[in-house]
Image: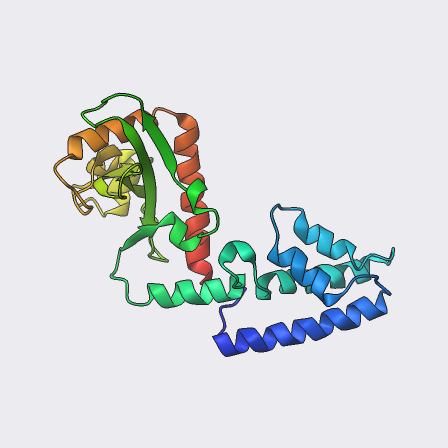
Amino acid sequence: MKTLTKKQILARRKEIEQEILEMLKETKSDFSLQHIKDIIYHEDDDDDIMKAVAMFDRGGDISELSNVLELVTDAWNYFPHGVLGGISPAEEALDIRDSLKDLPLGAFIPFFKLFPENIEMKSRTIILIQDTFGLPKGRYSLVENYCAGKECDCRKVMINVVTVDSKPTILGTVGFGWEKAEYYIEWLNNDGLGEEMVGAYVEAGGIQTGLEKECLDLVENSLRDSKFVNLLKRRYKIFKEKIKSI
């Protein structure tokens, strides 16, 4: 989806609305434009887009189904979604693009900056039922940050350890690189820092409050879970794909 201006997005939305009205009439559907808008706005699972497609279904041929799919996909991209705060994915992409304009080279930004829907599910939460790793009992969130550089392929994450029970506060930042040393040595043109990017480490470029070692121990314990490591890799991939599309 190409990132357009706000004016172009609104103009395209009007065009899609008219195309939907014409398609509903052509397919003799019992549904209205508002039905389509409501499904998109209140979407809560991956099947909702197919529910919208079904509103046009009259048992037509493959060509007609292809046209309906294309139209519904356009509507999905340009109509407002409740989970996005009442804006469309096209508007969200525009907001993200504008927010990235003035970022310094190599800046890391939170994963939920690009994927704001259901923020509470974007970070792993750890509950310490007693003082552990030198940290007091309570809940801690591991907030992932990835590099916003379109051409960068650093294959690492910066994890902020954030208090949850009290006022959210970043206690420390841990870096984690999942590739072998050879990858980072080549990526950094053998400048001697490659081996330091392997595994978990205190992130020199992150926020620290004197609890670096404690935060590192907490994160390293989570990284023993291969599912968490694989999740970080997947999120890195989709984060990069979205950055490149903006």
Tell me where residue 129 appears, x and y as whole percent. 31, 22
**Residue that extends furthest to the front in the rendered view of this protein:** 166
Whether residue 227 is visible to the viewer of this picture, yes or no, is yes
Q: What residue appears at the point 47 percent right and 60 percent down from the top-left corner? A: 245
161 left or right of 237? left
Q: Quadrant of residue 140?
A: top left
The one of 85 and 204 positioned closer to us in this rendering: 85
237 left or right of 139? right
The quarter of the rendered structure image containing the N terminus is: bottom right
Q: Quadrant of residue 9?
A: bottom right
Above or below: residue 92 compared with residue 49: below
Tell me where residue 66 appears, x and y as whole percent. 75, 60
Q: What residue appears at the point 18 percent right and 41 percent down from the top-left corner? A: 193
Q: How many marks?
A: 0
Whether residue 223 is visible to the viewer of this picture, yes or no, is no
Q: How is the image coloured?
A: rainbow
Q: Quadrant of residue 235?
A: top left
Tell me where residue 31 appears, x and y as whole percent. 79, 61
154 left or right of 191? right
Q: What residue appears at the point 19 percent right and 46 percent down from the top-left corner? A: 207
15 left or right of 129? right
Tell me where residue 174 appears, x and y as whole percent. 24, 38
The one of 224 and 31 positioned closer to us in this rendering: 31
The quarter of the rendered structure image containing the C terminus is: bottom left
The one of 50 and 190 positioned closer to us in this rendering: 50
Above or below: residue 209 compared with residue 94: above
Q: What residue appears at the point 72 percent right and 67 percent down from the top-left corner? A: 33
The one of 90 and 65 positioned closer to us in this rendering: 90
